[in-house]
Amino acid sequence: MKDFDESCECARDNFCRFVQGNKKYTNEEMDYLIQCSLGKGVSKILRVGYVLVVWSFVAVWIDNLLFPGALGYSFFKGEFSWVTISPLLFLLGNATLKALFIKYRLKDQITVFEAYWASIPYIGFAFLLRSQFKKDKILYVAAKDYFFYQKNLVKKEVKAFFGFKTKDDVGLNI
């Protein structure tokens, strides 16, 4: 009965399905990655990573508007004010909220220190992957492959939404 339960769990797990459909891995590697996915909560880590990526896409616009605006204001006014401090407060607040979110979602899988490292804008997800899978090269490579696969799917969907033709209208090769 365990095989049936594992099969059902794997069918609900995106990473597990990705590994099953990927021709890159041998059967032994595939079995190992599926066990890791179901046992270590790989999909949970990847979902936290996706949130961090989206969070960074939103924060980049705020950073690109607030920081230059505050610096320009300070330069032209010739003074240091709350307008200058506000982007720094946003950066610190944003990093703290990210770290709290990461620690809350991953609980014992990550330390507070690692959560703060993972909250670094734009590169935090890479740190999160490295810190969680650094001892397991196969899992690390598979997680990176999965992330790039998902990134390509999102790019394809965005292009389709805006009406752009893609080279691979049939589907992405895994």
Image (cartoon, grey):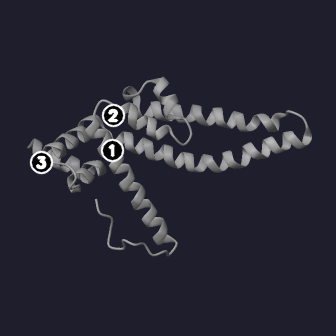
Q: Position of residue 153 (x, y in %)?
A: 39, 61
Q: Nearer the viewer, residue 111 or 77?
A: 77
Residue at image point 43% right, 41% down: 48
Q: Residues within 10 Å of mark 3 (few under 14, many from 20)?
A: few
Could you tell me the amino acid type at mark 2?
Phe
Question: Which residue extends farthest right?
Answer: 77
User: On the rendered image, what quadrant is the N terminus found in?
Assistant: top left
Q: Earlier in the sequence, mark 3 or mark 1?
A: 3
Q: Please state the horizontal and vertical placement of residue 14, each as a whole percent of the image.
A: 30, 51
The residue closer to the viewer here, 95 or 123, is 123
Q: CA distance from mark 3 to mark 2?
A: 28 Å
Q: Which residue is mark 1?
A: 143
3D distance between C-alphas at marks 1 and 2? 9 Å
The picture quadrant where one finds residue 91 is top right
Could you classify mark 1 by the number of other residues whose Cα lies within 10 Å: few (under 14), some (14-19), or many (20 or more)?
A: many
Q: Quadrant of residue 122?
A: top right
SS at badge 2: helix
What residue would you read off at disc 2?
133
**Front: mark 3 or 1:** 1
Relative to 79, is 161 above or below? below
Quarter location, residue 138: top left
Indicate the amino acid at tag 1. Ala
On the rendered structure, is 76 left or right of 21?
right
Horizontally, residue 144 falls left or right of residue 162, namely: left
Residue tagged 3: 4
Q: Which residue corresponds to the image point at 48% horizontal and 69% vertical from the top-left?
A: 159
Vertical order, 138 against 111 (above or below): below
Q: Is residue 6 above or below residue 130?
A: below
Task: Residue 61 in the image: state x and y as whole percent.
Answer: 65, 51
Residue plotted at (39% across, 72% down): 167
Secondary structure type for disc 3 = helix
